Image (cartoon, rainbow, N blue to C red):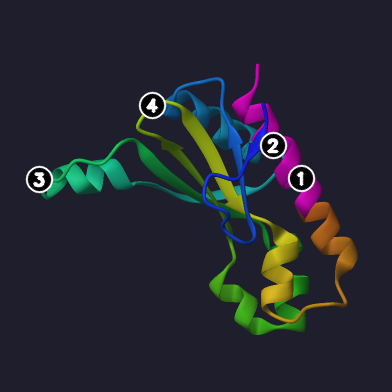
Amino acid sequence: MSAVNKTHIEGLTTIASNFGPKETMDRLETEIRTKGMEVFARIDHAAGAAEVGLNLRPTELIIFGNARGGTPLMQSAQTIGIDLPLKALVWQDAANKTWLSYNGPGWIARRHGIADKGGVVGKMSEMLGLITKKAANP
């Protein structure tokens, strides 16, 4: 597994998956739930595109988190609520390679001017790194 920078999108971490899109997303959901977080939604963008007669390679978003992690950040800057709960995107490129992308919590915190919650942001970053690596690798 390696982090990639396909088009350099600031704040976005993208890792290669050793599994197909559905298996990657299912593994990610399992890891999220194992860590005690709630899954609020899974949005299948490809299915939505198909419903209106358009083609889109597999692209699915998962929205997840918990109040214990997000609330301290919102106490510092309520505007961070636009970026919380956390999200991760599993997608397949034109070469049929599966990728997993997410916004880094440090970048999200900086975006909202939060400088006083380094411990929370650090734990969130570590957790995201662990669950995404487990989802993408055997």
Callout 2 secondary element: helix
Q: CA distance from mark 4 to mark 1?
A: 29 Å
Q: Residue at x 75, y 73 (%)?
A: 73
First along the sequence among labels 4 and 2: 4
Q: Main secondary structure of the magenta part?
A: helix
Q: CA distance from mark 2 to mark 1?
A: 6 Å
* Mark nearer the viewer, 3 or 2: 3
User: Is 104 left or right of 45, judged from the image as shown?
Assistant: right
Q: CA distance from mark 4 to mark 2?
A: 25 Å
Q: CA distance from mark 4 to mark 3?
A: 22 Å
Residue 137 belongs to the span the image colors magenta: yes
**Residue 130 appearing in the image:** yes
Which disc is residue 131 wearing? 2
Residue on which the image places disc 3: 53
Counting from the top left corner in percent of width and height, residue 3 is at 66, 38
Query: Mark 4 is on which residue type?
Result: Ala
Query: Mark 3 is on which residue type?
Result: Gly
First along the sequence among labels 1 and 3: 3
Disc 1: CA contacts within 10 A as few (<14), some (14-19) or many (>=20) = some
Q: CA distance from mark 1 to mark 3?
A: 38 Å
Which disc is residue 95 wearing? 4
* Mark nearer the viewer, 4 or 3: 4
Disc 4: CA contacts within 10 A as few (<14), some (14-19) or many (>=20) = few
Q: Which residues are magenta?
A: 125-138
First along the sequence among labels 4 and 3: 3
Q: Residue at x 88, y 77 (%)?
A: 116
* Mark nearer the viewer, 4 or 1: 4
